[in-house]
Image (cartoon, helix red, strand yellow):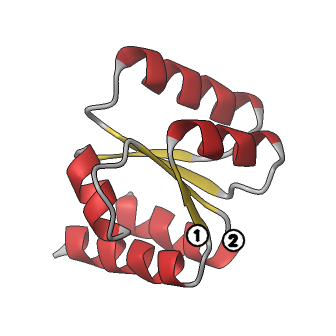
């Protein structure tokens, strides 16, 4: 049940244009401090995981791991996605409570 909740919320955030997907774009949003939460798929490459988690740590942006890239992509109605950044404080807070 919980999985559906965060996925529909992420879908909603996406429709509200408050979501950026893709590693490079997400890191750019982290650097500019626009990202409020980063979602990383558990099956991302070691390299990507390290890059994204390090970047989030240095900019103090929460990073949550989700099961896999297909769920992440499906939630925002796209192909498999490894990294997704949420740009809205409200959506980010709610997603964090659902993903804890």
Q: From what the image shows, is residue 42 above or below residue 67?
A: above
Q: Residue furthest top?
A: 47
Q: Residues within 10 Å of mark 1 (few under 14, many from 20)?
A: some
Residue found at x 43% / y 72%: 10
Residue 74 at x, y = what percent? 26, 64
Residue found at x 27% / y 46%: 69
Residue 3 at x, y = what percent? 22, 67
Answer with left or right where residue 10 lies relative to residue 2. right
Looking at the image, which is closer to me, 43 or 64?
43
Q: How many marks?
A: 2
Which quadrant holds residue 30? Answer: top right
Q: From what the image shows, is residue 60 above or below residue 96?
A: above
Where disc 1 sits, the SS reads: helix
Q: Residues within 10 Å of mark 2 (few under 14, many from 20)?
A: some
Distance (Cα) linking label 1 and label 2: 6 Å
Where disc 2 sits, the SS reads: helix
Q: Which residue is mark 2?
A: 89
Q: Residue furthest right?
A: 32
Residue 13 at x, y = what percent? 52, 78
Q: Which residue is mark 1?
A: 93
* Dots 1, 2 in contact, CB < 8 A: yes
Classify the position of the C terminus by image quarter: bottom left
Classify the position of the N terminus by image quarter: bottom left
Looking at the image, which is closer to me, 51 or 25?
25
């Amino acid at each position: 049940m919980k999985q559906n909740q965060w996925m529909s919320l992420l879908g909603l955030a996406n429709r509200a244009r408050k979501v950026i997907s893709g590693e490079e774009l997400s890191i750019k949003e982290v650097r500019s401090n626009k990202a409020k939460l980063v979602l990383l798929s558990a099956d991302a490459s070691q390299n990507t995981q390290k890059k994204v988690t390090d970047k989030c740590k240095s900019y103090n942006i929460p990073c949550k791991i989700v099961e896999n890239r297909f769920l992440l992509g499906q939630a925002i109605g796209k192909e498999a996605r490894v990294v997704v950044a949420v740009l809205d404080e409200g959506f980010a807070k709610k997603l964090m409570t659902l993903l804890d």
